[in-house]
Amino acid sequence: MGFLAERRTRQAENRAAAAAAEARHRAGQEIERLTGESRAQRRAGSWDAAATTLAGAVRLGTEQFGPDDPRTLLAGFEHGRTLLQLHRLAEAEQVLRAVAEAAAPHSDQRRQDLRFDALGACGSVLLRAGRNAEAVAVLEEHRELARQSGCDLAGSPAAEELADGYLAVGREAEAVRLYADTAAHREAESAAGRSTTAVLRLRGKLARALLLLGHHAQAERAARAVLRAAAENTAAAGRWSAAAVLARTLVQQDRAAEGEAVAREAAAEWRRAKGPESKPLPKLDHALAEALIAQQRYQEALDVVLEQLAAGVTAVGVAAGAGVAGAAGGGSGAATVFQCDLAAAHLELGRPEDALRAVEPFLARHRAAPAPRDHAALVADTLHGRILAALGRTGEARDVLTANAAVWRERYGPEHVHTLAAERALAALSAE
């Protein structure tokens, strides 16, 4: 190649490189513009538009800089959070996992911070999707990253979500410790140590975890403390949950009449706060149904449950195994803990066939979930065994109740109220 030809080639290469650099510069500016525009859209409440804008920013960043460029990662993280707010959970998970995976091989602080944030948001997505075991694994990885970087998550929303996950997968003792620690940190941070709404919510969750563990005296004290602190705040997030927990723990201490009174009083307060036409609060009606069944007022319990099912309830937020989305879920609105209340009432009214039909959707949902069986599923299994016994299917009932009692004993101890109930049902079979 001659001198002039070589010079022209170099000049062409330089022009191409300059054009490419200019294109990348403009692309970087456009990504920043789109990210800023999406924030304005979210502030204006235009979440769908923001998701579309951020998808464009991620696409442009991936094309121009690659999926692991910090600009792409930031746009991806914000896209994932926006999809979470829109409850487009499958898309949110995909986007957030892509951010975490793309950032993982890099050691610089900016990318690791984005990986950390993406993992935390991904844990939230999985909790809301009811994929509780996966959520716990992701949130524990998130906590470990925080520990390695010297970041203290005590009192943070991430700590509360991990406690929610522990409760959902049957790790109640760990949930109790984490709820108590998180509430203490939040309370210390609040003005003059007063209980904020967030603290009341956490202490209400703590009371529920204690109830599930069978620590009834502690659960009662914790629930009453929340109700005292929330007496002047009908909007407090933990107020109604604490009332439901108090009612249920009284029932489990053979004080069903007191439990009924607590549930009815709280329901009346709910109607006063929300208006006389407001729908009954499911968690309070669940507690009321339990109290009525414990007092052998089965028809009244059935009426309470049928009212909730007629209202189209799909989630009551009272069972451990449902994550933050509530105690029901899945494709069928019938698969709620009210199905267990309905089945229990039918069984005690001498209608075991109706009881079996009522409980089967709940059982099917939990059998499809990964092990271990959660607290609500174990309660349903005990009930299922009793129903099978009432139908004369003694061999099946014995198999169900033997396995069920063993799990209760192993996970919750021999003195837990539900362990004793399962063993009584099994003993009744042997006595026949």
Image (cartoon, rainbow, N blue to C red):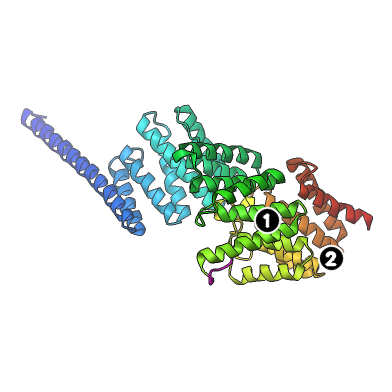
Viewer-nearest residue: 81 or 233: 233
**Does residue 389 sit above or below 194 in this rendering?**
below
Q: Residue furthest left?
A: 4
Which one is earlier in the sequence, the residue at label 2 or at label 1?
1
Q: CA distance from mark 2 to mark 1?
A: 31 Å
The residue pinned by badge 2 equals: 391
Mark in front: 2 vs 1: 1
Q: Residues within 10 Å of mark 1 (few under 14, many from 20)?
A: many
Span colored in magenta: 276-281
User: Picture coordinates of residue 97 (x, y %)?
Assistant: 45, 43
Q: Callout 2: helix, strand or loop?
A: loop
Q: Is residue 369 visible?
A: no
Viewer-nearest residue: 17 or 145: 145
Q: Residue furthest right?
A: 432
Q: Quadrant of residue 429?
A: bottom right
User: Picture coordinates of residue 382 (x, y %)?
Assistant: 77, 55
What residue sits 78% from the left and 43% below the top? 409
Look at label 1 and name its amino acid.
Answer: Ala
